[in-house]
Amino acid sequence: MRQKKLKYVTLELMEENGVIVRPEKLNITNYHLEIGAGKGDFITSLALDNPNTTFVAIERNINVCYRILEKKNLNQIDNLIIILDDANNLFEYFHFNSAKMIYLNFSDPWPKPRHHKRRLTYKPFLEIYQQLLNKDGIIQFRTDHLAFFNDSLNYFENNFNIYEADFDLEESKYQTEYEKKKRLKGKIYQLKAGQKYD
């Protein structure tokens, strides 16, 4: 869905309010990272309930990212870092083996076969996540698109140990704004996986 452009939202405004808008290495470990954080309902709720954990939201759309900033400021969330950038640039910000948790919530399913390589669960991205996660790190993937979920199960099986594959996820406190809408129409699918060691 196309997001309304907010004329007053600029890179300068975002940076003045603490959003990271250009690459810099963050000296953090054991953080929870949401890739494609949308308007931030999920990550801000988690951060509020876990003040001793560092959370990071990365979102490439400046207008959507601004909504995360609004929620952060409104709720005075000090343990949330916001990055305005694309998932392709994760290593510009994070060290190897530094993440405790990675969340992929309702990313674009790219249903056409020729577009599958753009999926955030496709092999090149999974290899990035493997290098970002620490040895006990977990990746959680959630979607309402069954074909995308099944394909992703196959992708993950080659790179991770799958701990959970839920084909009808129960409603939880932590939901994205998209999930809240889609739950009214059908099932939500969730996968959890960890590092695979020989």
Image (cartoon, rainbow, N blue to C red):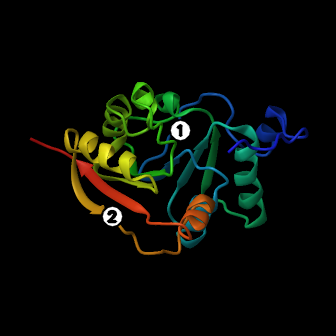
Is disc 1 placed on a helix, strand or loop? Answer: loop
- Residue 20 visible? The answer is yes
Residue at 39% x, 29% y is 113
- Residue 51 visible? The answer is no
Kind of residue at disc 1: Leu
Residue at 66% x, 28% y is 22
Q: Position of residue 61 (x, y in %)?
A: 68, 38
Residue at 54% x, 55% y is 55
Q: Return the mark for residue 167.
A: 2
Which residue occupies the foreground of this view, 43 or 3? 3
The image quarter in which residue 42 lies: bottom right
Q: Earlier in the sequence, mark 2 or mark 1?
A: 1
Residue matched to label 1: 26
- Tell me the CA gap for discs 2 and 1: 36 Å
Q: Position of residue 160 (x, y in %)?
A: 23, 45
Where's the N terminus, which quadrant? top right
Q: Position of residue 81 (x, y in %)?
A: 61, 49
Q: Is residue 174 above or below residue 145?
A: below
